[in-house]
Image: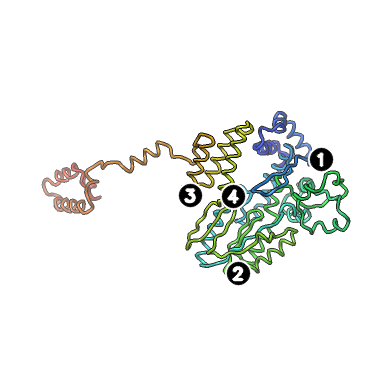
Amino acid sequence: MDTLEDLNVLYESYKRASKSSTDKVETMRFKSNFLSEIIEIKTEFRERSYVEKDGSEFDIKERGKKRHIHGKGMKGKTVGHAYSDYILNDCLRPYLIHNNGASQKGKGVSFSREEFEKELRNASEIYGSFIIAFGDFSKFYDNIVHRTLKEMVYPKVPEDTHWLFDRMIDHFKVDVSYMTDEEYATCIEDKFDSVEYYATIPKKMRTGEKFMEKSCNIGDQISQDVGVFYPTPVDNFAKIVCGCKYYGRYMDDFYFMVRTKEEAEKIMSGIKEQASMLGIFINEKKTHTVRSGDRFRYLQIRYFLKGKKVIKRLRPEALTRERRKLKAYKRLLDKGEMDYEKIKNCYKSWMGAFYKLMSREQIRNMKTLYKSLFKEDPRWKKQKSPSVRQRSKRKRTAPPTSQTSLLSTTEARSQSKRLMEVLRPSTAPGSRSALAQMIGTGLPLSSRQRQRS
């Protein structure tokens, strides 16, 4: 706990927590009195009196999928960042496989895509034709069992921080007072859907009589870290027990590559057993196998193999969705509900991330749409500085600076031979003057001739 009680650690955690919400009233209020706030957090850590408080709740739609989000206050965010960045990440990272790329410093979705493409090329070279299996965990965060999670995390984090981890995880408990005794007895084994729960169970039925120790809130810093770590037994089963060389996972999406379909079915059945032991469920609709010669999709990118070359393309749905977003941004801008600088940054960020996967026609159409909406064509690709362009142009078109550059290799050798014939008798009169004359013309000299000169 000495690390977490350091005021410098708490101050850095506060800055990271407030980075994405600097314009909110609560953030400004915390900022105006941040020193007293972090001293209060330190005191609560020392006395072990810190308690998680409820924050905001709201629903969002991500690619047409509804999600229920829990937001924390600035104090809870600061504590979450402190524990996650300075304790949990460092303790859990050594137990993660290399191809687990979500929510980790130095990794991310780009890293996971690159590793996937690298393994496609390697598998194509070794196997030739092979099978690729894709899987997904259904309602992943909603079905993380707290007891199992604590048993996995406790041996890996300092013992004096267990109480704080307990407080943060116990805050995710779900009020299931509406359940009968029979339903409550099996609620841990049954699949839980938080979106359906908050849509159908009113607050008056959540009386606090019964709680289900299950689920982690989407949007919480601790949830991201435990979500990356929780399916580690599945990863170890595929990589170590089954010896699957080409396996990777990005949060709740995973894949592996094997020679035959029978081998893929055997590994997938073992993964399902491991997942059931953890209390999480495989999404049967998204779990499938494809041949290496077919087209397939991973992390929103379409892939296909052409020999040993990996071809990737942006999904048309992603392009359509971005065009609709720009039109929606325009409506919000006209109403004064959105700032143009934010719109431009969103556009530049999206184009910078996906332009390499788009055709020239798609890029031209996106630029035309943006210009028709906002009367501007911002640069989204990093441009070379004028000095670099001029320097490279001069290097390509620079004229020859001496007579030497005009001589071919054959001519240079013949001149050297004639020079050696002239200088062969080292005591011959006029040899040095002949050498000096050749040097003055700029003809190439050998190393021995240079020494003599």
Q: State which tag comes first along the sequence, 3 or 4.
A: 4
3D distance between C-alphas at marks 1 and 2: 55 Å
Frontmost of labels 3 and 2 is 3
3D distance between C-alphas at marks 1 and 4: 35 Å
Decide: is 405 above or below 274.
above
Could you say which disc has been placed on residue 75 in the image?
none
In the picture, residue 276 is in which quadrant?
bottom right
Tell me if label 3 and label 2 are in contact, CB under 8 Å.
no
- Determine crowd level at label 2: few under 14, some 14-19, many 20+ residues with C-alpha closer than 10 A: some
In the picture, residue 347 is in which quadrant?
top right
**Which residue in the protein does label 3 denote?**
359
Left or right placement of residue 215 versus residue 381 in this view: right
Q: State which tag comes first along the sequence, 2 or 4.
A: 4
**Which residue in the protein does label 1 denote?**
49
Q: State which tag comes first along the sequence, 1 or 4.
A: 1
**Residue furthest top in the image:** 32
Q: Which residue is located at x 80 percent, y 57 percent?
A: 188
Decide: is 251 above or below 352.
below
Q: Secondary structure at mark 4?
A: loop
**Which residue in the protein does label 2 denote?**
261
Using the image as rendered, state which of residue 5 and residue 237 is in the foreground. 237
**Residue furthest left in the image:** 429
Rendered location of residue 437, percent (x, y): 16, 43
